[in-house]
Image (cartoon, rainbow, N blue to C red):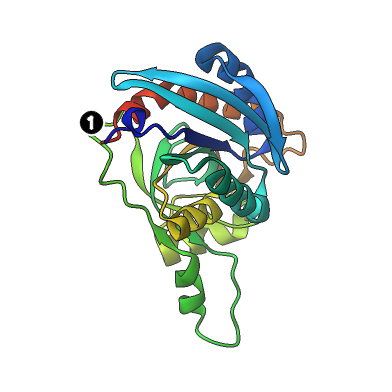
Amino acid sequence: MTVAQSGSPVVVVISADVEWEVARPRLIDRFGAADAAPTPYGAVMVGAAETAAGGVPLRFTHGGWGKIDAAASAQHAIDRWAPSLLVNLGTCGGFEGAIERGTVILVTRTLVYDIVEQMSDPAAALAHYAVDLDLSWLKTPYPLPVQPGLLLSADRDLVVDEVSELRRRFGAVAGDWESGAIAHVAARNGTRCLILRGVTDLVGPGGGEAYDGTLTFFRERADVMMARLLASLPEWLAASL
């Protein structure tokens, strides 16, 4: 059954404040989205997407940044709308030398890496929140060139001195703040989840491209990446079995 045939809306969570700000005009223009009653975590806009499989009702919600709001807003969305699919569109920081800026990551696994367990098994603590996303329902070829793989999450920007160890320890190439929490909540509820994150900036030995204290670089790159992701959204919806 496609999302168009399910009758339930698709909920699209956009997490960070900057991501939501640059996405909002496109939600209006592309999906006819209009303001609805807000949630405790941010604005909600109601729209629709026309796909080859039919019209899909959409709820766009600003989920908020960080794991706490990401988890809470994802659960709120599931409880309120019982979506046929929970989509998270957003950005991430890439590891310099491991991935190119502008790459779209199709997240197949999430791992929350800022858990420090010293009383029992640290590996078990990490495994508790790790999620392998079942994407067997997605048709191929995918609407965009993507790099499927792991995305790390933590309540912190990538720390320059930690990047090489994160790459060695987990085989990771990028990280964000929210994906791990969203995937965990979706899995606990048995809700299909699609996470697409575009690499806006790179972090390496020389520092972070977006670490300028102004958000200017990040905002410019986020605008580009959110435009690409939103333009492809109807095709991703049509690619659902």
Position of residue 23 in the picture relative to residue 138 (left or right): right
Q: Position of residue 19 (x, y in %)?
A: 62, 32
In this orientation, which residue lies closer to the viewer: 72 or 169? 72
In this orientation, which residue lies closer to the viewer: 99 or 140? 140
Q: Which residue is mark 1?
A: 141
User: Badge 1: few (under 14), some or many (20 or more) residues near its Cα, within 10 Å?
Assistant: few
From this viewpoint, which residue is outermost toward the left?
A: 140
From this viewpoint, which residue is outermost toward the top?
A: 29
Quadrant of the drawing holding the N terminus: top left
Residue 25 sits above or below residue 80 on the image: above
Position of residue 55 in the picture relative to residue 154 (left or right): left
Position of residue 221 in the picture relative to residue 88 (left or right): right
Q: Position of residue 190 (x, y in %)?
A: 41, 55
Residue 78 sits above or below residue 210 on the image: below
From this viewpoint, which residue is outermost toward the right?
A: 213
In this orientation, which residue lies closer to the viewer: 53 or 12? 53
Q: Residue at x 63, y 53 (%)?
A: 72
Can see residue 31? Answer: yes
Can see residue 176? Answer: no
From this viewpoint, which residue is outermost toward the front?
A: 7
Q: Position of residue 32 (x, y in %)?
A: 55, 14
In this orientation, which residue lies closer to the viewer: 158 or 145? 145
Q: Secondary structure at mark 1?
A: loop
Identity, as a three-letter code, of the amino acid under mark 1:
Pro
Quadrant of the drawing holding the C terminus: top left
Q: Residue at x 47, y 53 (%)?
A: 186
Q: Residue at x 51, y 14 (%)?
A: 30
Q: Position of residue 96 (x, y in %)?
A: 49, 45
Residue 106 sits above or below residue 178 on the image: above
